[in-house]
Amino acid sequence: MAFPPRPEIDVAQTPRAAAQACAARIVSAARSGLGARGKFSLALSGGSTPKATYEVLAADHARDVDWTQVHFFIGDERMVPYDDPRSNFGAARAAWLGALGLPESCLHPMPIAQDGDAGARAYERELRTHAPEGLDFVMLGLGDDGHTASLFPGRVEALPPARWVVAAQAPPTSPIERRLTLTFSAFEAAREVVFQVCGASKSRLVADILAGRGGFPAGKVRARESLRWILDAAAAEQWLAERPSRPAVS
């Protein structure tokens, strides 16, 4: 499979502008997918950064898409109840999905009650049923150690190449070690993958990943059609400093 040679980089002035840019990408992709194929599948991300995007979608885009025709998945999940504040799907539901009046058939949280591998296989079957060629859109974030979803440094070398979902183990420093996660193969099958990264603490890491340094899991992500990084100015600072010509900051 041929992938785009390098990711597209969008730099926004503020975290709010980055959230608006990410929301706009989701809306555009959803409208295009529904218009062309009559369906759209979206894998959401956990963490604090995408919460701002969900809030923008809830406030500004509730009527821009027929969200009842979208299938919502999650990129990774901690094995906690959905009403636990550490649940990724629970956080997305609280910030956005719960206000959309969606039928339960649109919502696809990861199964937290099953054994890890059994739950991963069940979720993969569900994913392949609704998106047999791959997801239409995947949101991703970036951890301080270069992980994305629940793909952590030193823990991804032996991933089964054909699997889209696997059980994962976070480092012992994580409060919740047991996880389920989408894999690099799932991202490679997706039409569009978008990283959303904000904050000065990520600036050095972003520059290293975009320059191909360090072998971080986030740097190994590819997509079928489009791979994009949406950064705020603080997260982009080091990358911009290393660029021979700097793009305009929106």
Image (cartoon, rainbow, N blue to C red):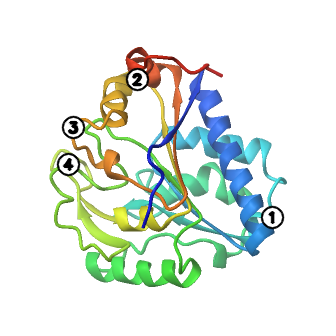
* Amino acid type, residue under disc 4 in the picture: Pro
| Label 3 CA crowd tier, 10 Å (few <14, some 14–19, many 20+) | few
Q: Nearer the viewer, residue 52 or 29?
A: 29
Residue positioned 45% across, 84% down in the render: 125
Quickly name the residue at label 4: 153
Sequence-earlier tag: 4 or 1:
1
Residue positioned 25% across, 49% down in the render: 175
Sequence-earlier tag: 1 or 2:
1
Q: Quick check: 168 above or below 29?
A: below
Q: Position of residue 31 (x, y in %)?
A: 77, 59
* Amino acid type, residue under disc 3 in the picture: Gly
| Label 4 CA crowd tier, 10 Å (few <14, some 14–19, many 20+) | some
Mark yes or no: residue 182 visible. Answer: no
Quickly name the residue at label 1: 66
Residue positioned 22% across, 68% down in the render: 159
Mark 4 element type: loop
Q: Nearer the viewer, residue 182 or 192?
A: 192
Q: CA distance from mark 1 to mark 2?
A: 37 Å
Q: CA distance from mark 1 to mark 3?
A: 41 Å
Quickly name the residue at label 2: 239
Mark in front: 1 vs 3: 3
**Is 95 left or right of 211, judged from the image as shown?**
right
Sequence-earlier tag: 3 or 2:
3
Q: CA distance from mark 3 to mark 2?
A: 15 Å
Mark 3 element type: loop
Q: CA distance from mark 4 to mark 1?
A: 38 Å
- The part of the image, by quadrant, that contains residue 13 is top right
Sequence-earlier tag: 4 or 2:
4
